[in-house]
Image (cartoon, helix red, strand yellow):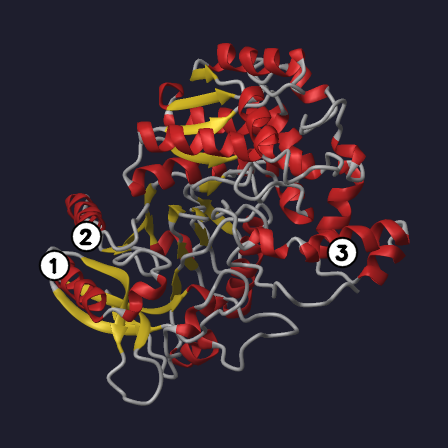
Amino acid sequence: MKIALAQLNYHIGNFEANTQKIIQTLNSEKAKETDLVVFAELCVSGYPPRDFLEYPEFIELCKTAAEEIAKASKGIACIIGLPIVNPVIEGKNLYNAAFFIEDGEIKQVIKKSLLPTYDVFDEYRYFEPAHEFKCIDFKGYKIALTICEDLWNLGDNPLYKTCPMDELMKEDPDLMINIAASPFAYNHDEERIFILSQNCRKYEIPLFYVNHVGAQTELIFDGGSLVFDKAGDLVTEFKYFEEEIQVFDVEQIKSSIVLNEKSNRQTDTEQVYQALVLGIKDYFRKSGFKQAVLGLSGGIDSAVVCALACEALGAENVMAVLMPSKYSSDHSIKDAEDLVKNIGCKHTIIPIKDIADTFDETLAKEFSGLAPNITEENIQARSRGILLMAMSNKFGYILLNTSNKSEAAVGYGTLYGDMCGAISVIGDCYKTQVYQLAEYINRNKEIIPQNTITKAPSAELRPDQKDSDSLPDYDILDKILFEYIEMKKSSKAIIADGYDADLVAKVLKMVNRAEFKRYQTPPTLRVSPKAFGMGRRMPIVGKYLS
């Protein structure tokens, strides 16, 4: 039996495009005499469809698309993922399901049992868990088909009471197939390989695993589909961040003949770079946008975002707006201009000195007798935000936010100023990671000026300002933030790791007090295991500092 794994990029709710892509793949594989084509979890609807699932019409369109795919599967078999109606009154209205289609007919329906509700996942909001398990009989093989999370209940501390594969093994299957929608995080590929390999070692049968690729707003799917032999050894690892289809002979996999062994191991920085480029590209393509605008300050954050946007959209589709204030240094303006020359994007210069001065003069009476403070700094940032949004409105550009995760964590940003934007590009990258991205961008030639990388970071909103005036050095700050946000450690545990107690208390207080700002930020491209946004849901008025 020849099985094709189709690692494809779907578009949520775009039934015409998704269906056409699936049928084109079926026709292509039919010509190659492939027996079975396996597509990813919820491929018909795209993943995650979220509250689209609450619209009966959306579910009906999924059903119509599946019927069209079935008609196109004459002479071949396929597995597709889609939401289906739960006919039982008790429980949730839907199942997360897979259709096994053979020679034009829907022969079997497999339902997902384990429904994740942690981090970015919220499947139990919509779906009823399955409690029945049955293998698929095809071409003399018994196939144990599972859906994503159904294979993730291994280890000493299982999250669920049911283990679908334990139930399916009662029928003595010959192989496992898992269709998935597994989002990218820079540490997730190793974890994914380990878990899936452990399944093969436990059940002693080969595994064919297919994942989504592509970005759906903040969630980025990296692909990296996998095939393992019955010993748990990796046979094939698909490309990351690209569509790919490969065909396998089951007998050769079963007898541990490695057909296409390869490794796509990449550094975390390289993976994050590719993920962000794909995130920008798909956000624009799937939303129907073509051109981006951003503020270019001469600092490291906006330089990295500009380089990423030019790679994703083409330099001709990126407008960089330089908005020097009376505090902007000559070298910052030159750094920004040098970047524009190196990268070839469009640019314009709009000074904000007169705009900020006008605000100050207008408010002089109201602020009489009060010393200048952060208010005047924020007026400059908000002046820039107004200009960028004006450029967006007038020319149809989409504004890219350039704030990093360190700033977002401690509230070092201005609402309705530098926190404006339609999508936050590096909002899940700590400042130290932004520097790593800059070095990677410059791996072959200087794109980001070296002075941008080596100079002390500054918002340049007052004379001789440095980030270090308000924040600890980023090398220390980012480590504390990582321990608190990603590792969920208490202040006591972080202090026990050797960090100054007063500094830890200050940083954690800043993080918790800035929650109201993060609620008002753009969606953030997720590249870490714990990003701000849908994967980290904190109360704004909560009081927790330990």
Amino acid type, residue under disc 2 in the picture = Thr
* 381 left or right of 205 in image: right
- The amino acid at mark 3 is Lys
Which sits earlier in the primary sequence, circle 3 or circle 2? Answer: 2
- Image position, residue 107 (x, y; %): 19, 72
Tell me the tag on residue 240.
Answer: none
Q: Where in the figure is residue 491, as x and y percent of width and height?
A: 81, 60
Task: From the top left corner, tell me how far across and down residue 175 is, in percent.
Answer: 39, 65
> 77 above or below 378?
below
Disc 1, SS: helix
Residue indicated by mark 2: 19
Say few, some or many: other residues with alpha carbon within 10 Å of mark 2 (under 14 / 14 to 19 / 20 or more).
many
Tag 3 near tag 2, CB within 8 Å: no
Q: Nearer the viewer, residue 490 or 99?
A: 490
* Residue 290 picture quarter: top left
Which residue lies at the image location 25% right of the left edge and 69% below the top edge? 55
Q: Mark 1 touching mark 2, by CB under 8 A? A: yes
Image check: 227 left or right of 291? right
User: Label 1 crowding class (10 Å Cα cut-off): few <14, some 14-19, many 20+?
Assistant: some
Q: Earlier in the sequence, mark 1 or mark 2?
A: 2
* Residue behind mark 3: 509
Distance (Cα) linking label 1 and label 2 = 8 Å
Question: From the viewer's perspective, is the residue at label 3 or at label 2 nearer?
Answer: 3
Tell me the residue that label 1 is attached to: 68
At x 25%, y 72%, the residue is 84
Residue 310 appears in the rendering = yes
* Residue 532 in view, yes or no: no
**Type of the residue with mark 1:** Glu
Q: Circle 2 — which element?
A: helix
Q: Which residue occupies 37% across, 41% down?
A: 283
360, 153: nearer the viewer:
360
Please tell me which of labels 3 and 1 falls first in the chain: 1
